[in-house]
Image (cartoon, rainbow, N blue to C red):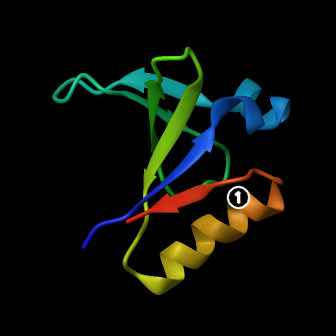
C-alpha cells in the first residue's frame, strides 16, 4: 500500500519558497520542488480551483517518514496523508 502527503504551497513559509529549487523532470514532465533541509522532493500540482499543492511520497521507512513529518511540523506546515 502506498501513501502520499499533501501540503498547500501557500502554507510554505516565504523563506522556504524563496530558497526552493523547482524544475521539470525530463522523463515524467512533472514539475518538482526541493526545499532546504527537506528529506524528500515534492511534485507540484495545480488543482482545478487554482490552488497549488505539493505531493510527497509518504515513506515506508520509519526514520524517513519521521524526518519528513518533523520537517513539516518544524516549519508549521499543515499536511494530510492519504492512503
Disc 1 crowd, CA 10 A, few/some/many (<14, 14-19, 20+): some
Asked whether residue 39 is in view, the answer is: no
Q: Position of residue 52 (x, y in %)?
A: 57, 25
Vertical position of residue 42 compared to residue 44: above or below: below
The structure residue drawn at horizontal position 19% and vertical position 29%, both measured from the top left corner, is 28
Relative side of 37 to 22, left or right: right
Looking at the figure, which quarter contains the C terminus? Answer: bottom left
Residue 36 falls in image quadrant: top right
Q: Position of residue 48 (x, y in %)?
A: 45, 17
The secondary element bearing badge 1 is classed as helix
Relative side of 25 to 10, left or right: left
In this view, the residue in front, 3 or 56, is 3
Q: Position of residue 41 (x, y in %)?
A: 46, 46
The structure residue drawn at horizontal position 28% and vertical position 27%, both measured from the top left corner, is 25
Q: According to the image, label 1 marks what residue?
A: 72
Relative side of 77 to 26, left or right: right
The structure residue drawn at horizontal position 59% and vertical position 22%, both measured from the top left corner, is 51
Relative side of 4 to 74, left or right: left
Amino acid at each position: 500500500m502506498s501513501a502520499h502527503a499533501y501540503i498547500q504551497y501557500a502554507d510554505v513559509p516565504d523563506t522556504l519558497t524563496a530558497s526552493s529549487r523547482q524544475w521539470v523532470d525530463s522523463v515524467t514532465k512533472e514539475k518538482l520542488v526541493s526545499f532546504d533541509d527537506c528529506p524528500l522532493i515534492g511534485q507540484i500540482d495545480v488543482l482545478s480551483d487554482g490552488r497549488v499543492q505539493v505531493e510527497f511520497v509518504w515513506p515506508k521507512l520509519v526514520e524517513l517518514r519521521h524526518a519528513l513529518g518533523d520537517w513539516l511540523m518544524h516549519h508549521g506546515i499543515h499536511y494530510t496523508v492519504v492512503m
